[in-house]
Structures are given as C-alpha cells and as structure tokens.
Amino acid sequence: MADHVRDLRPLHENAHLLWALRLALPDVLFDTTVDADGVNARLHDGAHSWAAISALPDGRTIASQGGPRLLVDELEAAWDAWTADGAIGLYDHGLTVTPDDEQFVWTGDPDTGRRWPIRPRHR
C-alpha cells in the first residue's frame, strides 16, 4: 500500500481530466464514490489488475493495487502528463476516421497534433 497526498476530487468532478484519462487508459474501468473522508476510486483493467484509492480523514489517500499492471501508477502518470500538457480540455480534441478505417482522437491539429488510436472492441 502506498500513501499519497493527491486530491482525488478532480477524478470525481473534472470532465476534462476524465476525458484525458479515458484516452490515455482506454482499457481501464474506474469509478469514484464520496464519503465523509473524501473521494475514493476503484480501478480495474477488465482482466487481472485492480486498484483502490481511499481517502483518509487527514486529506491523504492510501492506495492498494494488485495484478500484473500497476494501475495506480498508470493513473498517476496519465494525470501528470495531462497536467504537464496544460490540462487540455475535452473540447480541444477531434476525431478522425480515414478511408482505410484508421480511427484516432487528436488534439491541436489533426495532422500534427498528439494522437490516441481508437482500438476496435472485440466482439
């Protein structure tokens, strides 16, 4: 278990952050709940990895994770990258589908901006 200081309220309230995390971690499912101590989060990769982040009364959080992936670490890295990129808003993104069925979300410019591929879901 790791002890953190990050405020989880944006993970519960900020649609721009949630969009960025969905792009960066498309296969990770997460939800949040709020209790008297603050925001708590649960993450799962749909396979074998899981994580729980719980708010403590003093404002800190405690994280537990298991499985082959370190989902808390991935969440923190994606959140930090979004912040470092200037907290890009969800309306600053676009979607492109090429004639060859390549699909991706982009930010800034569809030709030169950062891209996130959209992977087809297996049926």
Image: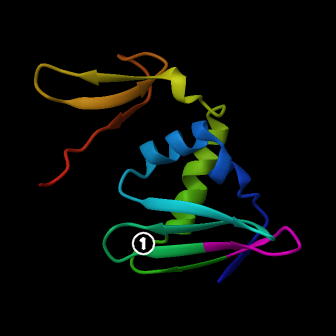
Q: Look at the picture and state if 90 lies above or below 34.
A: above
From the viewer's perspective, is residue 52 above or below residue 114? below
Magenta run includes residue 118: no
- Range of residues picked out in magenta: 53-62
User: In the rendered image, which quarter is residue 42 located in?
Assistant: bottom right
Query: Label 1: which residue?
Result: 69
Query: Can you say which quadrant of the picture contains the N terminus?
Result: bottom right
| Image position of 27 with respect to 19: above or below | below
Is-magenta flag for residue 58? yes
Element under disc 1: loop
Residue at point 39%, 77% (across, down): 68
Residue 111 locus on image (x, y percent) = 35, 16
Q: Position of residue 73 (x, y in %)?
A: 56, 65
**Outermost residue, right direction?**
58
Q: Crowdedness of circle 1 by 10 Å Cα count: few (<14), some, many (20+)?
A: some
Q: Amino acid at mark 1?
A: Arg
